[in-house]
Image: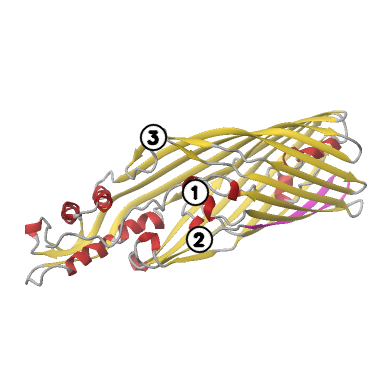
Amino acid sequence: MKKLILFTTLFLPLFLFADGIITNTGETAKSISNPARLASTGIDAVYSNPAGLSRLAENGFYLSLSNQSIWQKKEITTKFSPLPNGANRYQDNQTELLSPSIQVAYKKNKWVFSININTLRNNDVKYAGSPAFESNFATLPLLITQIGHALPAIPGMQLSADGYSLSQQMQYSSKINNVQFGASYEINDMLSVYGGIRFVSVRNKYQLNGSNLKVDIRSSGLGLWGIADNDGSLTDPSSFLNYAISNSSIEEQRRSLELLQKATTETGVRLETKQSGQNISPIIGVHFSYEKLNIGMKYEFRTSINCKNRTSYDDFGMYADGEKVSSDVPALLSIGASYEITPKLSGSIGYYHHFEKEAHIVDNRQEHIDGGTNEYLLGLDYKINKMFSISGGIQITRHNINKDYQRDYNFVLNSQRFGIGGTAKVMSNMEVYVGYSWTDYSSKNYEWEDYNHTGITGSNNYSKGKKIFSVGVVYSFR
């Protein structure tokens, strides 16, 4: 039999885990119901508009406690001819009941000192496999059949394959916690400024496993080459892989075949690693007030973070134990304005720009970002009476990326988020508020002529949805 020539290089690291775009969904129930709080002068301004804290009514301590409960669904529909029936659907449903945030402020005349504690990202994804990972195994029957076509025309000698089975699992979690503290100062009745720092910690965990690989092989008359006879039923392809490994002349291809062979075992091929890192960066802000108009601006500098790998298993050679990888939190600019239309009704607008292009992301994913994420916010607040008020708003998010940015475990889509909520003033110094939002994502289909470097066309359709319920309380000690 001729020397083996593989038609593809398998296990390219297109399933490489890497953090990506971060967009905040809101830190309090007020921002869940009305996301356009970027010119706020209430306690929630600790995060959204810290320079505006100088407009707090009285001296004293202010405390805000809130929690978000998040329900999110992600789905990838892949069309790739080597997959069973030429397509597969990968789904993940996340439920995160606890995602708390705390805002504390102390005002003394022209000065306000504040602390904010919240989560920028809490992502936990679990798929029964993924397109980029499974495509490495799906092409094995094609490879076997290709070798069969190269056999000499000898009666009784045959080799072909059609279909496979594989136990696979992918789990990815990423948590980014944020602690921000600083001081606001009222220059005059119209102008206030803020300066502070944020401490950001990143914790990632990646798990990947493929095992019990079997292939529908039909073979006979190949005992001379160590390939067992099989009637076309699912079987362990190790005898073929042993032959392929011994006859492969390219080291990279031999390594890929060895991974396929390891995937035939109960343990299979595995990746298990944790990453952690932290750093600080400055934040500045300015607030302008004139009669019924408030304008707030804030700039969060890029937080440069290098995460250290703590790797238990890595059959793919992607995450060397002790190695550091970039996982920056990008800079963020926010601009907002609010206006009191009537004594009961006020309107607000806002804008976010996330500078992802300038951040450093593992695998250089920032090279596939064309500019950065833009978000446009609009909201209304209405006072029903002295005790109750309601609010609502919309947040439009637009990403500027190309298809090579997307990853199975962490993909981004343009979206529209709608919110509604209310506040009850239960005491002179205490408010309780609730908020609910739902996000409509625009599903996106991408096609590749060379899917995962297999030489075969394929496509992924990405879609997801999210709902958030938040409840909180504000208390002032005056």
Q: Are marks 2 and 1 in contact (CB under 8 Å)?
A: no
Q: Is mark 1 on a helix, strand or loop?
A: helix
- Judge by depth and name the residue closer to the eye, 265 or 371: 371
Q: Mark 1 points at which residue?
A: 364
Label of residue 321 in the image: 3
Residue 313 seen from this side: yes
Q: Where is residue 469 in the image (x, y as percent from the top left)?
A: 65, 48
Q: Name the residue under label 2.
A: 403
Label 1 or label 3, whichever comes before in sequence order = 3
- Location of the N terminus by quadrant is bottom left
Vertical side of 457 occupied by 432: above or below: above
Vertical side of 427 occupied by 252: above or below: below
Horizontally, is 386 left or right of 377 in the view?
right
Residue ID at (22%, 66%): 146
Horizontally, is 191 left or right of 379 in the view?
right
Mark 2 to mark 1 CA distance (whole Å): 14 Å
Q: Where is residue 285 in the image (x, y as percent from the top left)?
A: 76, 40
- Judge by depth and name the residue closer to the eye, 369 or 68: 369
> Is the residue marked by circle 2 packed among few (<14), some (14-19), or many (20+) residues within 10 Å?
some
Q: What residue type is labelled 1?
A: Asn
- Judge by depth and name the residue closer to the eye, 315 or 416: 315
- Judge by depth and name the residue closer to the eye, 36 or 371: 371
Q: Is the magenta stretch mostly helix, strand or loop?
A: strand
Mark 1 to mark 3 CA distance (whole Å): 20 Å
Is residue 390 rendered magenta in the image? yes
